[in-house]
Image (spheres, coloured by chain):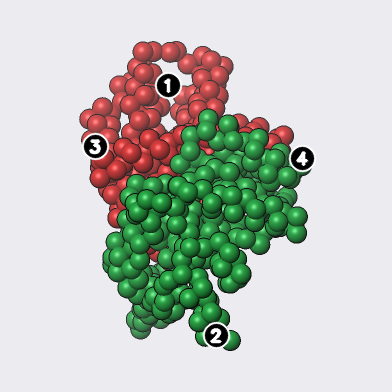
Chain colours: A green, B red
Amino acid sequence: MNQEIAIEVKDLHISYKCLKSFSIKRSLLQMKKTQSTVFEAVRGVSFTVPKGEILGIVGKNGSGKSTMLRAIAGIFSADEGIIDLHGNSVSLLSIGVGFQRELTGRENIVLSGMLLGFTEEQVHEKMDEIIEFANLGEFIDMPVKTYSSGMHSKLAFSITAILEADIMLIDEVLSVGDTRFKKKSYNKMKELISNKDRTVIIVSHVSETLQELCTNVLWLHDGQVKMIGAPEDVLPVYEEFMS
Amino acid sequence: MWQRFKKDFNRFFSYAVFSARSDLKAEVASSYLNWLWWILDPLLFMLVYTFIAVIVFKSKIQYFPVFVFVGLTLWNFFNRTVLSSVKMVRNNSAIVSKVYIPKYILVLQKLMVNGFKMLISFVLVFVMMLIYRVPLSPKILYIIPILFVMVCLTFGLGCIVLHFGVFIDDLYNVTQVLLRLVFYMSGIFYSIGDRVEEPYKSILLKCNPVSMLIESARMSMLYDLTPYRKMIVLWGIVAVALVIVGIRTIYKYENSYVKVM
């Protein structure tokens, strides 16, 4: 395996400060200034992920895992620090990708694909594969608002799984849909992950999954790196800490 | 910024087009009468204003129904786009919190949807011009720069309003009132030139770009007059400046939008 670096995160700080939206009415009624609360979700995280590696991230709720993933996906700005993806394309795979509720599943596939940086033709090429994988039957031509939540996630998963990006960020998505789809998506996941050129970051609470899939595990605690290393080393300590 | 804009624009433009097309399609599909409303809406409002102006205020404007229709067509485009920009990020939170998209693309998408409806409305204007036997003159070509300024103005204002809409919860209410004020100051169903005394007449026509553009459109399309060319160029410059300011502002702050929601 080459040691080319795919993701480089250096001293990353992300905070939610003074960004409360305010209303004109409220600021007129309450003359006293509202205090701006600062909440630092990620404080000084640095790590690098070599190309082809699968990094698992663990940590309790609210330890900044999702925030960091979104920052890597380019949705959040970092307040301090650098995120360098070395020009790789990135897609965030999380439960319930944003769909336009009024549009059909088919159109949403194209829209999501285009948002992920593919051209309309590229999406159309993969269209059949996505539809087959999602296995929604005739619902694919119905507006997304008629979907059940399971169907919603199945479609979302299929789109990001089949339209492959260089870097995949997976946010606890491994349990989607019914048992059958779960098995199928898990296998697809493994297939995607096992591709040597693909870099993956998985956020999960299920230690077995991480144990099986990951080459490295990062443990985030209150926005800081508590431990980073091989799954065998990190996961037992984490399990013990949590219990 | 120009480099980044060019790159993003190339990448997301086709998304905006496709999304706008699907939006229009979905609107038609959800109810068969819906596309009829694109025509009926301005048509019925035209009747309302014609009633008020002709019966109540005894207006004697030539081709009055067409006069109102031109005003409504441009006004609806401006009003709808700007108003929907206020809650744009909030309404698209599903997309905005999942992938990166330059937020002005959302305004662009709405601009296209409303622009298409405006085109349909313009087709109706031409039909009405035929019915009322309005003589056609080459001056009608002035409508092209007029529309260009209108689109830039709407887009620029939309971007700026989108930015503040994220941070201010009740901006929607404020914008609604302000837009209503602009509506009455734009002479949609009366002629500012005939009805308003100086100095307010010049102020309304020169400082309110919407009324200036609507008035210019009517002059060139219906009355074979040369529109306010200087004002169009002047406001054109302002509109382009607004677009630049809007895009710049969005680029600077857009990554913090998700944190506010």
Does A158 sit above or below residue B87? Answer: above
Q: Is A107 placed above or below A64 here? A: above
| Mark 3 or 1, nearer chain start | 1
* Foreground label between 1 and 4: 4
Give the residue at x 37% y 50%.
A2
Residue placed under numbered mark 2 in the picture: A240
Element type where label 3 sits in the image = helix
The disc placed on residue B222 is 1
The answer to whether tags 3 and 1 share a subunit is yes
Identify the chain of the residue marked 1, using the numbered disc in the image.
Answer: B
Which amino acid lies under the numbered mark 2 shown in the image of this protein? Glu
Chain of the residue under label 3: B
Q: Residues within 10 Å of mark 2 (few under 14, many from 20)?
A: few
- Element at badge 1? loop
Q: Mark 2 falls within which chain? A: A
Question: Looking at the picture, which amino acid does disc 3 mark?
Answer: Ile
Q: Nearer the viewer, mark 3 or mark 1?
A: 3
Q: Nearer the viewer, mark 4 or mark 2?
A: 2
Question: Is B182 in front, or is A98?
Answer: A98
Residue plotted at (50% across, 28% down) = B119
The answer to whether the residues at label 1 and label 2 have Cβ atoms under 8 Å apart is no
Contact (Cβ within 8 Å) of mark 3 with mark 1: no
The location of residue B113, given as percent across then percent down, is 52, 37
**Do marks 3 and 4 both belong to one polypeptide chain?**
no
3D distance between C-alphas at marks 1 and 2 = 81 Å
Dot 1 crowding, Cα within 10 Å, few <14, some 14–19, many 20+: many
Of the numbered discs in the image, which one, if any, rests on residue B237?
A: 3
| Badge 1 and badge 4 both on one subunit | no
Work out whether residue A148 or residue A181 is closer to the camera in this orientation and state it. Answer: A181
Going by the numbered disc 4, the residue's amino acid type is Glu
Picture layout, residue A225 above or below residue B72: below
Q: CA distance from mark 3 to mark 4?
A: 51 Å
